[in-house]
């Protein structure tokens, strides 16, 4: 079995503007210099307006930067969207695809698979998000729902993409709510994701992350599960010290 390096990714969502981004990066670099680089791989997904500032500030460091979304088209009449070339031009090394907050706005199915393919073909890493609602979990639909999301999202994947691809399982009921899945719930869901992704990729190589109210206080127990290879962190990623504490817990 291959050794999968943990990946800790901070999703800033619609937070952090202008000088705040500069201050964040300066503090993150200071902490990395003072305490050393963690064994886990680090990534940040800032808002689009901060991408160039953040990627420029972190250039040469061990942190890569990604876009919170990407469009599948190379260019065209897509007001408000962003292309792979635009992300790359802003210094990005990856893109997040299919976050539940984007899926809720209608981004589903074949378009997400095409976005994964476009990102990878454009030389970026791709992270596909999936997860069920509380209503679906209570109705016993988690397995069918998550299986469908993973199969749809990987429809255009190729086996040799595995090194630049990851999947983040984020139960919608745990995103920004303060409610976190138990380690057992998170492990079971991530094991399911790995099993389904294994239909397309080497299951021992694919990295599966957990997301949903991950904090320094619960990170070690969650990241200690055998099928959890890192975390997609929301609110806690807005403080560099908290993000690094989570990374060191991995």
Image (tube, rainbow, N blue to C red):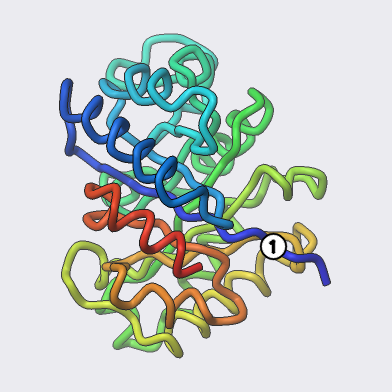
Relative horizontal placement of residue 227, taking residue 77 as reference (left or right): right
Look at the picture and state if 26 lies above or below 101. Answer: above
Instruction: Tell me where residue 224 appears, x and y as whole percent.
Output: 52, 80
Look at the picture and state if 138 lies above or below 167. Answer: below
Instruction: Tell me where residue 165 appears, x and y as whole percent.
Output: 64, 47
Question: Which residue appears at 39% of the width and 63% of the height?
Answer: 246
Of residue 4 and residue 244, the one placed in the foreground of this image is 244
Can residue 73 be seen here? The reply is: no
Relative horizontal placement of residue 210, taking residue 30 as reference (left or right): right
Question: Which residue appears at 25% of the width and 72% of the height?
Answer: 173
Look at the picture and state if 83 lies above or below 216. Answer: above
Of residue 31 and residue 3, the one placed in the foreground of this image is 31
Question: Which residue appears at 69% of the width and 60% of the height?
Answer: 206
Can residue 170 be seen here? The reply is: yes
Question: Which residue appears at 61% of the width and 80% of the height?
Answer: 226
Instruction: Tell me where residue 211 appears, x and y as whole percent.
Output: 38, 64
Callout 1 secondary element: loop
Instruction: Tell me where residue 87 appears, x and y as whole percent.
Output: 46, 21
């Amino acid at each position: 079995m291959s050794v999968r390096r943990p990946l800790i990714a901070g999703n800033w969502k619609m937070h952090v503007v202008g000088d705040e981004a500069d201050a964040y990066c300066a503090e993150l670099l200071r902490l990395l210099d003072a305490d050393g680089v963690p064994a886990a791989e680090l990534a940040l997904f800032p808002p689009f307006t901060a991408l160039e500032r953040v990627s420029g500030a972190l250039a040469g460091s061990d942190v890569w930067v990604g876009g919170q979304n990407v469009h599948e088209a190379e260019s065209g009449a897509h007001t408000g969207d962003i292309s792979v070339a635009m992300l790359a031009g802003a210094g990005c090394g990856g893109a997040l695809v299919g976050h539940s907050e984007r899926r809720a706005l209608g981004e589903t199915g074949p378009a997400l698979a095409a976005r994964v393919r476009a990102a990878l073909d454009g030389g970026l890493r791709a992270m596909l998000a999936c997860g069920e609602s509380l209503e679906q979990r209570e109705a016993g639909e988690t397995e069918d729902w998550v299986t469908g999301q993973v199969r749809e999202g990987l429809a255009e994947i190729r086996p040799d993409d595995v090194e630049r691809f990851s999947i983040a399982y984020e139960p919608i009921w745990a995103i920004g709510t303060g409610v976190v899945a138990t380690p057992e719930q998170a492990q079971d869901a991530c094991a399911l994701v790995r099993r389904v992704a294994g239909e397309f990729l080497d299951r021992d190589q694919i990295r599966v992350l957990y997301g949903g109210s991950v904090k320094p206080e619960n990170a070690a127990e969650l990241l200690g599960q055998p099928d959890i290879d890192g975390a997609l962190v929301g609110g806690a990623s807005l403080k560099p010290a908290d993000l690094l504490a989570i990374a060191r817990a991995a």
